[in-house]
Image: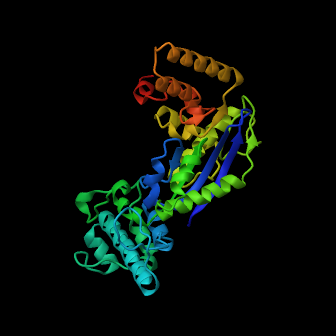
Amino acid sequence: MAFLAQIKADSISPDGIRLTTFEATYPRIVHSEMMTHRVFSRNSASTRAIPIATQLYNLLTNPFIPEKFGVNQPGMQAYNHLSGLKHDQAVKVWLRGRDRAVTTVLELILGPERAESVLEYESSREYVSGDILLRDFNKIRSLLPKSTDTVDLADTDLLNVHKQLAGRGLEAYMWHTIVLTGTEFDNFYALRDHPEAQSEIATIARLLSQVHKDSAPKQVQYGEWHLPYVDTDEFNNVDDGIRSSSARAAAASYGRQNIKNPEKEFERYDSLRSGGHMSPLEHQATPFERREWDYIDMQRLFSLEQSKRGVISKLVAREKIAASKYSGNFKGWRQHRKFVPSEHNFGKLRAV
């Protein structure tokens, strides 16, 4: 795995507003920076969802290793970097950290005693090198309890800690894949493809910007839909396309967003809605219709008149005018999520 930016759907409305869905892969260490941009709808790989054996194998065969190791200095950015033997030494230290993290996960699941027995080391003083972990990986995999196994902890050395905690220590060394949809990217590109940004997020921002520039959006008419992960003629009716698109976006949690199985996807979609998991329903959208824009224009005139009369301030008027152009975090496109009653409050959904 490595940095990756690709477009899964690229649409433009009759009013010239572009909506784009990306699939992007970048180091997990900068995921929090990506999450600060509220204009995007997102679903991404989950440490809680992907089987721990899969995570361990990915880390042993293809860990994230920084391309550059900045030298410590005041501030949030390093401008000088290690080179030559110093760089090589930093890579070795980084990978030893990966090995320690993997060893810790195995101890949290197998228990220190069994981990020691299988991998022949002393857990209180040592960790297991990546070469040995990879060499013995099939044996390790066979010992890891499946989530469906019933384990009596009283009769075993196992700790069997769940991956939602056991896997967290691995995240510094992970690659991370996200499905990301939005109508406004200029601010993101300006902030993140910048010398002051951490180099890893600058790299993915630059890649996203480039594929965005190179892509020609498809014209989507009023009443039609932007449906990432769905082929143009895949379904006979749009409702099935919406359901599958939503379910496939949700499958990013497991890294299975590109696997198609409509029957299971329809079940997953129903589960998402009934369980209040609405974020995968944000990537599908239809353009604001002409009558909606007419209503927005009426609201604009009303807000301006209210401002002139002193009923509201100019600032409030500007905010009202700006907000009227959005559905959720999309400008000029209505998200599928907004068609679901009580989508904003799971408490109300649960009560239905």
Residue at 47%, 24% (x, y): give it. Answer: 316
Q: Is residue 243 left or right of residue 317?
A: right
Residue 108: % across, % down: 30, 64
Residue 130 appears in the figure: no
Residue 310: % across, % down: 46, 15
Residue 248: % across, % down: 59, 46
Residue at 37%, 78% (x, y): give it. Answer: 93
Quadrant of the snapshot with the N terminus: bottom right
Q: Is residue 216 above or below residue 220?
A: below
Residue 72 appears in the figure: yes
Q: Is residue 340 above or below residue 101?
A: above
Q: Is residue 22 left or right of residue 350?
A: right
The residue nearer to you, when weighing 77 against 170, is: 77
Q: Residue furthest bottom?
A: 85
Splitting the image into 4 quarters, where does residue 237 fall? top right
Q: Is residue 120 left or right of residue 212?
A: left
Residue 282: % across, % down: 56, 38
